[in-house]
Amino acid sequence: MTDIDSSSIEGLLREDLRGGTPYGAPQFDVPVRLNTNESSYPVPPTVVAEITAAVGEVAAGLNRYPDREFSDLRTALAAYLSSSGTSVDPAQVWAGNGSNEVLQHVVLAFGGPGRTALGFTPAYSMHPIISSTVGTTWVDGLRGQGGAPFDLTVESAVAQVRAHDPHLVFLCSPNNPTGTALGLDVVEAVYAAAERPVVVVDEAYEEFARPGTPSALTLLEGRPRLVVTRTMSKAFAFAGGRLGYLAADPALVDALRLVRLPYHLSAPTQAIALAALRHAPELLGSVEAIKEQRDRMVTGLADLGLAPVPSDANFVLFGGLADAAATWRALLDRGVLVRDVGIPHYLRVTAGTPDETGAFLAAMAQIARPEQ
Ligand code: PMP
């Protein structure tokens, strides 16, 4: 007999995980699913054929482990990033099963017990979860200190970095769930504010940014602690493919090999991501259409007397709701699933097809009750 109460798994669990709830948005089978910022556009048939063929080509070799260093994929991702005008070398690229895994690798390598990570709330809710599940102390920094409600000003960000002296800083641009991109001046100032933190700029939605919001990729040169993460889940319409990646200094990328599990990117994953990257223009072809729907949602919500936040992403956060939870429910009753991100009086909606925007705005017109 041991003194552990083995009748309760809770009693065996790490103390800091007890009573926790797993991350996860509802996966309801409803006609209009606008809650997880996926693309509503299916993979085009020509690309489906290429992906199928790519899987066929690796199938016979599945008796062997895949290329642990995913060299061809790194080269293709570097070429894609470089096509934006900032040259990125394959040695600067790392990838994982979604950018969540890539973020986890960064935290495993640079965070951990006795270390702290700072982010500016509200931002992507997995940043604190990934940090704390690997033992990093999370510090909830604040937005809206001197600017519009969700803005992050240079002065405020720098002051918070200096006050907390973290090992890791998370920035998110365009920011989920608010939608707005950060100025590069904030990234530069956060980087310069302290000497030790690894500064992560999560650019999951970068391809949807409005003109005039350049990527933090342009700041990588000469900043060995800067990391820019990206994903194929959003603009590439490839969320099910599970491929996220980052660009950083080659030495930082090399350090991530210490924490990844061997062969973490399966041969089919590498093959389908390569096939998708060969067809980047087709897969990215819906980005402009999605931006149009996003802007239509912003206008439509403002016309209803609500308060949409300016968006550089494929979603819109909108406020002015008397009761966000009741609106969420009323939308679901009309077959439209959006996201309650836990900000009082606000909901977040993903931009999809024109028909989905129409259904969402029509439902909102029926039920919207702007605050008096
Ligand atoms: N970063 C941000 C800001 C996100 O919103 C998401 C997905 N919701 C991710 C990262 C993770 O995406 P994935 O793991 O699919 O790449």
Image (cartoon, rainbow, N blue to C red):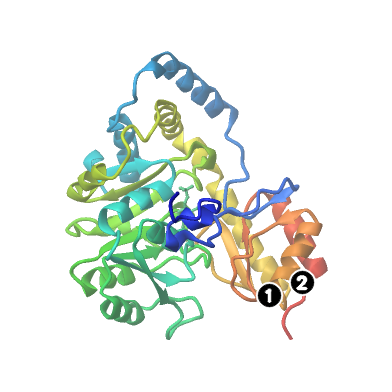
Picture coordinates of residue 309 (x, y %)?
57, 71
At numbered mark 2, what does the secondary structure look like: helix, strand or loop? loop
> Looking at the image, is mark 1 or mark 2 earlier in the sequence?
1
**Residue 358 appearing in the image:** no
| Amino acid, disc 2 | Ala
Distance CA(mark 1)–CA(mark 2):
8 Å
Dot 1 beta carbon under 8 Å from ligand 1: no
Disc 1 + disc 2, Cβ < 8 Å? yes
In the image shown, does 132 or 150 lie closer to the viewer? 132
Residue, disc 2: 368
Which one is nearer the viewer's eye here, 64 or 123? 64
Q: Is residue 245 above or below residue 295?
A: above
Query: Dot 1 corresponds to which residue?
Result: 306
Residue at 65% x, 67% y is 299
Q: Residues within 10 Å of mark 2 (few under 14, many from 20)?
A: many
Amino acid type of the residue tagged 1 in the rendering: Leu
